Amino acid sequence: MPAILLSTLNARYFHSSLGLRYLLANLGALQADAAIREFIITQRPLDIAEAVLAEQPRIVGFGVYIWNVAETTQIVALLKQVRPDLVIVLGGPEVSHEWEEQSIFRLADYLITGPADLVFAQLCQRVLAGDPPDEKVIAAEYPPLDQLALPYRFYTDEDIAHRLIYVEASRGCPFRCEFCLSALDKTAWPFPLEPFLAEMQQLYDRGVRHFKFVDRTFNLNAKVGVRILDFFLERLDERLFLHFELIPDHLPEVLKERITRFPSGALQFEIGIQTFNPAVQALIDRKQDNCKTEENLTWLRWNTHAHLHADLIVGLPGEDLASFAAGFDRLVALDPHEIQVGILKRLRGAPISRHTAEFDCRYNPHPPYNLLCSKAIDFATMRRLERFARYWDLIGNSGRFRNARPLLLGDDPFGRFMMLSDWLFASTGQTHQFALERLFDLLYRGLIELLGIAEPAAREALILDHRASGARGYPEFRRPSQAQDFTQSVTQRKSAVTANRQARHRINPLRS
């Protein structure tokens, strides 16, 4: 039975915790008496508590994040109720700031704030030696990265076969974007490159082909970026897949040249745009050359095979609906493969909180602390935008509607998709659990009734998309026995919608 359990609740089974593996790698002599136990948030807290207690540990360390704090709190309460002597140690971004108000902090024995790679081992040594510290909160300083034992050998064969493998060539971020906890970092620190690449070689030799880099600024140092890309180019095969976060306005020619060498399916870039509004960028201390960003995204889209995932944030201080819509349209015109529309969250400790009073930002008091309303965007509009984001994921980002998407967006992408989003919710009352066939039928109706697309064009585009999707079932608009009735019904509803619009136009004296 291990004396020390390292645990966390992942959002999905295929996720893995890089942080726990760092803790295990740096436990020194205690490593032989420690084990990692990962769970997922859909498991019942009582079942997780039972599994932990069955191993009779003396110390349990939990990684606490925004997505698992509620469930982890329940588990810690159960553990303490059954075994009050069990030493509970907390760490992670969710409890490293504003911990005094959190019930999980009151339940636990110790809290390590900041990077716990080395400090956790020191705490465990004292606890197991019968000399526990008096202070409950232990502030960890950033450790010299060349003193850390790297964690990659603690990915098991099961991890390699079934889970994402996270790696990092650097830590920290030199930028100060206030919505992000990385704004608290002083700079970015690289790991010694050759030892890191030696670890990547070992992972590669064990069969890893998907490497997800968690570096905030992979392309900050072009020489390091080139060396890493060269390493993988030398080992390129049809299964290799690399994920990197890129600074959007910094893409030196030497990096461009390497990127062009990767085939389709090998590279994915996550590119944080967040906002195109210069006044909002200045307000939140985000330094971004918008023209250079557009130039680089255009080059990546049309000169490489990389999959581009771009991020926008709804609700940043000073950005109203019109400003966000303009940014969305601007990004759509650049045609990245995915646009992730996220709602602003007030992460504990993030400097974005300094704008709360001025912009009357009201945040959800419970995780994920999403913005509910502000001076610029009222509650009802925020709810509409949340649904917009969800439907965009289902339709715009899914890759299933490549032929229908241009018809949906037309020359007013935000306006038309917001109209579709409102209509979808009014028609169905739901944002999740759509059967694929039903979603195709809804889009068929929406294109014709709402967006004014001619029926033959809507049908042709959706048939092509449905065929390409590989779906086995048939939506109603494709079923020969029902297609005529279904189309006639859609046309009748379109006529009714048009008549209602004309009637409203006639009786509204403010319309010209």
Image (tube, rainbow, N blue to C red):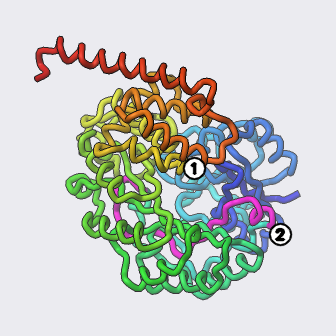
Q: Is residue 508 visible?
A: yes
Q: Earlier in the sequence, mark 2 or mark 1?
A: 2
Q: Which residue is mark 2?
A: 32
| Stretch of the chain drawn in magenta | 157-180
User: Which residue is found at the position 86% from the left and 50% from the top?
Assistant: 56
Observer-nearest of 399 and 274: 399
User: Which residue is found at the position 43% from the left and 40% from the top?
Assistant: 457
- Amino acid of disc 1: Tyr
**43 vs 269: above or below:** above
Instruction: Indicate the position of residue 116 as horizontal and vertical percent values.
Output: 60, 64
Judged from the image, the secondary structure of the residue bearing numbered disc 1 is: loop
- Amino acid of disc 2: Ala
Instruction: Indicate the position of residue 476 as horizontal and vertical percent values.
Output: 59, 28
**448 vs 169: above or below:** above
Image-quadrant location for residue 181? bottom left
Q: Quadrant of the N terminus?
A: bottom right
The residues bearing labels 2 and 1 have C-alpha atoms spaced at a distance of 27 Å
Could you classify mark 1 by the number of other residues whose Cα lies within 10 Å: few (under 14), some (14-19), or many (20 or more)? many
Image-quadrant location for residue 152? bottom right
Q: Is residue 433 visible?
A: no
Observer-nearest of 154 and 272: 272
Q: Quadrant of the C terminus?
A: top left
Q: Which residue is mark 1?
A: 65
